[in-house]
């Protein structure tokens, strides 16, 4: 009997050892290649907030003036703007609006976006309800041109109607772009304001000692989910299986976690858009990097930093604005953990030894190699959205997966070189990890 137990123990030890040494290979894709799982099913929303209602950011400024002032200068505060209250919010040249546009500036009530693109919300009665729709053209801020906009091309749902006039913003935009809409179905306040991240504040306004949800004091999973509620492309849980994805359900499916409030488990309200290594989709390249904006969460759940509890707000400050990403300039955000010579940092003594570029050059910025720009805000925009996989995209991978050459870390700067020569340069530097590239599409039998 003892011999049997010893054999079982040795076998289990062997299996555990194999799993342990293969974890680095398994974990990056485990979550999406198995049943999608964002986090624990634990509701940590403060009890006092469960009976509270939304009051708007004007109530927050009375005590939190500094935070409110900082937020007012961020992109979050400008994602939706009331044209009547702020005509200067319109950045498009309406004198060049194409003749077949199905809207005019006079009809538009809200702008959507301002930095990269801008769309326009038009009042509409859809399916018997007063709602809004988007115009069939959007202004590309980067190219300074109007371009065709069909919502069904930009959202996952293959059952959405092709006619913009039958496509309500309440199913797509409003959940993330209007504070309070996700939780209540009411447009409490345009844009992403305090309560979108901290939850309804009525009880806190009455009694400042009553708790609000505060991401910086929460566990890492719930903290990241505050950002993931919008910065993660999703599948509505009601459309979880293929046989449910029919045209009769298109008015029910939402492109945001309908009913979610910060502190609650996000997995109860949405599933991340599926991805399988080697398969290109509307949202992802075949290596897992994002093709579209607002996919940071989809990528980040692959990464070991996510597994070890590093949160979005460890790098991004949602209240302060020094740049679009609301993060420290240069390498400061990375080097505070990955210092030169540290256990989890570059093992070289100098930055030049690690990057093979001059220390004060673009090539020595961590994000240029580890967060290449792989995604766009529109089909006609340049690549401006950085990957959050935090993995180096090699020229050979770009070629193997049929990705645009601009999406790998080298070609983005060295467009005068071929992918082959760039790959040879990397291998000449002698890094072991570069010699162990796994390229499934090249290794088929």
Image (cartoon, rainbow, N blue to C red):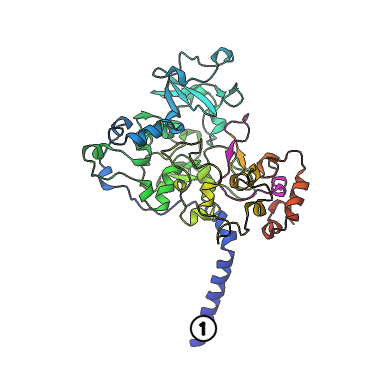
Residue 354 at x, y percent in the picture? 65, 54
Query: In the image, is 402 to the left or to the right of 190?
Result: right
Which one is in front, 396 or 359?
359
Q: What's drawn in magenta, residue-wise?
A: 377-402
Total marks shown come to 1
Residue 267 at x, y percent in the picture? 43, 48
Q: Residue 373 is drawn in which quadrant? A: top right
Which one is in front, 22 or 351?
351
Residue 334 at x, y percent in the picture? 53, 50
The C terminus appears in which quarter of the rendering?
bottom right
Residue 394 at x, y percent in the picture? 68, 49
Q: Secondary structure at mark 1?
A: helix
Which one is in front, 200 or 285?
200
Task: Farthest residue to the left: give it.
Answer: 207
Q: Is residue 7 above or below residue 391?
A: below
The residue wearing badge 1 is 6
| Residue at x 77% of width, y 43% of height | 418
Q: Is residue 94 above or below residue 186?
A: above
| Residue at x 51% of width, y 50% of height | 301
Query: In the image, is 70 to the left or to the right of 403?
Result: left
């Amino acid at each position: 009997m003892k011999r049997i137990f010893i054999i079982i123990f040795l076998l289990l030890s062997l299996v555990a050892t194999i799993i342990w040494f293969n974890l680095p290979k398994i974990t990056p894709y485990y979550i999406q290649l198995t049943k999608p799982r964002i986090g624990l099913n634990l509701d940590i929303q403060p009890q006092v907030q469960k009976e509270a209602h939304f009051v708007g950011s004007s109530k927050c400024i009375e005590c939190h003036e500094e935070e409110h002032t900082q937020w007012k200068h961020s992109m979050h505060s400008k994602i939706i703007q009331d044209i009547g209250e702020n005509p200067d919010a319109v950045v498009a040249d309406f004198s060049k609006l194409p003749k077949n546009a199905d809207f005019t500036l006079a009809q538009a009530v809200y702008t959507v976006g301002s930095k990269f693109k801008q769309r326009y919300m038009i009042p509409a009665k859809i399916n018997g309800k007063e709602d809004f729709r988007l115009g069939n053209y959007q202004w590309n801020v980067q190219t300074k041109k109007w371009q065709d906009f069909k919502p069904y091309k930009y959202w996952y749902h293959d059952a959405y109607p092709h006619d913009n006039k039958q496509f309500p913003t309440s199913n797509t935009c409003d959940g993330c772009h209007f504070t309070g809409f996700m939780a209540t179905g009411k447009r409490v306040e345009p844009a992403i304001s305090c309560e979108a991240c901290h939850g309804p504040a009525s009880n806190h306004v009455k009694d400042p000692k009553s708790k609000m949800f505060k991401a910086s004091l929460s566990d890492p999973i719930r903290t990241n989910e505050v950002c993931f509620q919008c910065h993660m492309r999703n599948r509505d849980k009601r459309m979880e299986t293929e046989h449910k994805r029919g045209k009769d359900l298109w008015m029910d499916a939402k492109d945001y976690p309908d009913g979610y409030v910060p502190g609650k488990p996000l997995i109860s309200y949405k599933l991340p858009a599926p991805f399988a290594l080697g398969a290109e989709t509307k949202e992802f390249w075949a290596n897992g990097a994002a093709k579209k904006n607002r996919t940071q969460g989809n990528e980040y759940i692959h990464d070991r930093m996510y597994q070890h509890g590093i949160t979005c707000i460890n790098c991004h400050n949602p209240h302060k604005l020094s740049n679009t990403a609301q993060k420290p300039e240069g390498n400061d955000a990375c080097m505070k953990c990955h210092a030169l010579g540290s256990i989890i940092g570059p093992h070289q003594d100098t930055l030049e030894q690690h990057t093979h570029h001059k220390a004060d050059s673009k090539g020595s910025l961590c994000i240029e190699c580890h967060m290449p720009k792989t995604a766009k805000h529109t089909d006609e925009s340049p690549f401006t959205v950085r990957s959050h996989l935090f993995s180096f995209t090699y020229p050979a991978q770009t070629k193997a997966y049929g990705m645009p050459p601009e999406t790998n870390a080298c070609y983005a700067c060295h467009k005068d070189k071929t992918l082959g020569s760039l790959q040879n340069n990397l291998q000449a530097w002698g890094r072991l990890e570069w010699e162990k590239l796994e390229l499934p599409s090249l290794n088929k039998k």
